[in-house]
Image: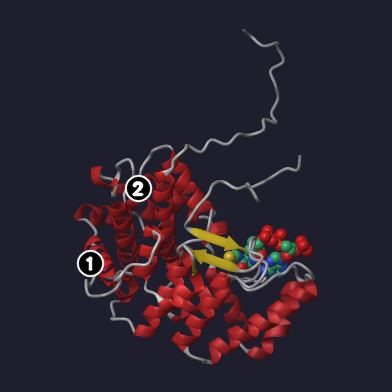
Amino acid sequence: MAKVTGLEGVVAGETEIGLVDGEKGHLVYRGYWAKELAVSKSYEEVAYLLWNGRLPDAEELAQLKAQMAEERVIPEYLCRMLDLFPASVPLMLVLQSAVAALGDKENTTWPPTLKQAVRLTAVLPAIIAYRARRLQGLEPLDSLPELGHAANYLYLLTGKLPEEAHVKALSAYLILCMEHGMNASTFAGRVVLSTESDMCAAVCGAIGAMKGPLHGGAPYEVISMLEDIGTVERAEPWLRNALDNGTKLMGFGHRIYKTKDPRAEALQIATLEMIGKDASFDLALHVEATAIALLEEYKPGRRLFTNVEFYAAAILKALQLSPEIFTPTFTAGRIVGWTAHILEQAANNRIFRPQSTYIGPMPESEVVS
Ligand SMILES: CC(C)(COP(=O)(O)OP(=O)(O)OC[C@H]1O[C@@H](n2cnc3c(N)ncnc32)[C@H](O)[C@@H]1OP(=O)(O)O)[C@@H](O)C(=O)NCCC(=O)NCCS
C-alpha cells in the first residue's frame, strides 16, 4: 500500500461550510463564491453566513454588528495578564493564552454555542491590537462601537479613523482568510472539540496549528522579494537568477490549487481599488506575469500560479501593518471558519481516533498472558 504522509488526500469528514477545488480554482462558502463575497459583503455578513448557513437580513445584520461591538471589550483581568508577558513571547502564543484565559464557565459549555463563537471572533482583533500597541510603546485604545469589525481593527492598530478604501481592502483580505476546508488549524480545532472539550480549548488548538510557518504564511517574504526586485526592468533577471539557484519564488505554487488561487484574484482587485494603479502595483503585476511564464519554462507541467500570499503582501504593505501582525491578522479572519467548524463538529460529533502503523521493534519474549 502506498505510504500516505500528512493525511494527504484522506477525507476526514463532511462539511457544509466550504469547498476548495484546486483543479478548477474554486473556493465556495456555503454556496457562494468566496471571491465575490470578499468584494461585495462586509466581514460581519460573511461571518453570519459561515456560522448560520445563510446571509443575514438587515435586522439580523444590525443585531450581529451590535453584539460584536459589545463583545470587543477586553476584560480588565485579561489586560493585566497581557501586560505580564515578556516582549519576547510570540504574539500567536500570547493570543493562545488570551483565548484560554477567556475560558470561564460561560465560554466552556458543552455543546459550544454561537454566542461563544461571536465573542471570541469579536474580541480577538482587540487583543492583537492591544498587544501590538504595547510592544510599540503606545497606549492601547478603546474600540469605537460605531465602526464595523474591519474598520475598528485598523483604528485600534493605527489610532486613526481609517479610509474607506483601506477598510474594504482589509475586509476583503479577512473574508478570504475565513475558510479553507480541512486545513491544519481547522482540523486541529475539530479534533480538540471532538473530545467534548470546549470552544476556547478548540480555538487554542487551532491557533497553535496556525502559528507554524507552513500554515500561517509569511507574506513579508513576498514583500522583501518585491522590494529587492525594485523595478520592472530588474524583474526578469532577478527571477531567472533565483530559479537558476533553485530558490522558490514566494507567492507562487500551492499544494491544492493548480490554477490561479481564487483568493489571489480577489485580492488583486481589492489592491487595485485601494492603492490604485501606482508604481508598486505595476511592479507586482509585472513580477506576477513574468514569474508565471518563467515557472512554466523552468518547471514545465508543475502548474505553478499565483497564491494568496502574493497579493496579501501587497495589501498588508499598503495598510502599513507590521510583519509581526501578519499571521495574527490572518488568524482574525480564520477564526470565523474555525468556530463554524467547531459548531458543525459539535452538532454531529464523534471523537477523532485514527490508527497508526507500528514500525518499532517487538519484544523478544513470547506474549506474557
Ligand atoms: C506552496 C508550496 C509549499 C506547495 O508545495 P508542494 O505542493 O509540496 O509543491 P512541491 O514543492 O512538490 O513543488 C512541485 C515542483 O514545483 C517546484 N515549485 C513549487 N513552488 C515553487 C515556487 N514557488 N518557485 C519555484 N519552484 C516551485 C518545486 O521545486 C517542485 O519542483 P520539482 O518537481 O523539480 O522538484 C510551494 O509551492 C512553495 O514553497 N511556494 C513558495 C512559498 C509560498 O508562496 N508559500 C505560500 C503558500 S500559500
Q: Amino acid at mark 2?
A: Cys
Amino acid type, label 1: Ala
Q: In the rendered image of this protein, does residue 230 appear above or below residue 21?
A: below
In the image, farthest residue toward the left: 76
Q: Is residue 150 left or right of residue 285?
A: left
| Marks 1 and 2 in Cβ contact (< 8 Å) | no
Q: For the residue labelled by badge 2, is the local secondary structure a helix, a strand or a loop?
A: helix
| Residue receiving disc 2 | 200
318 over 221 or under it: above or below: below
Which quadrant contains ligand 1? bottom right
Residue 290 occupies which quadrant of the picture?
bottom right
User: Where is residue 342 drawn, in percent x and y?
Assistant: 41, 49
Q: Position of residue 194 (x, y in %)?
A: 44, 40
Mark 2 or mark 1, which is nearer the start of the sequence?
1
Residue 247 at least partly seen: no
The residue at the point 62 percent across, 89 percent down is 231
The kind of secondary structure element at disc 1 is helix
**Which label is found at residue 299?**
none
Depth check, mark 1 against mark 2: the one in front is 1
Quarter that holds the C terminus = top right
Residue annotated with mark 1 = 66
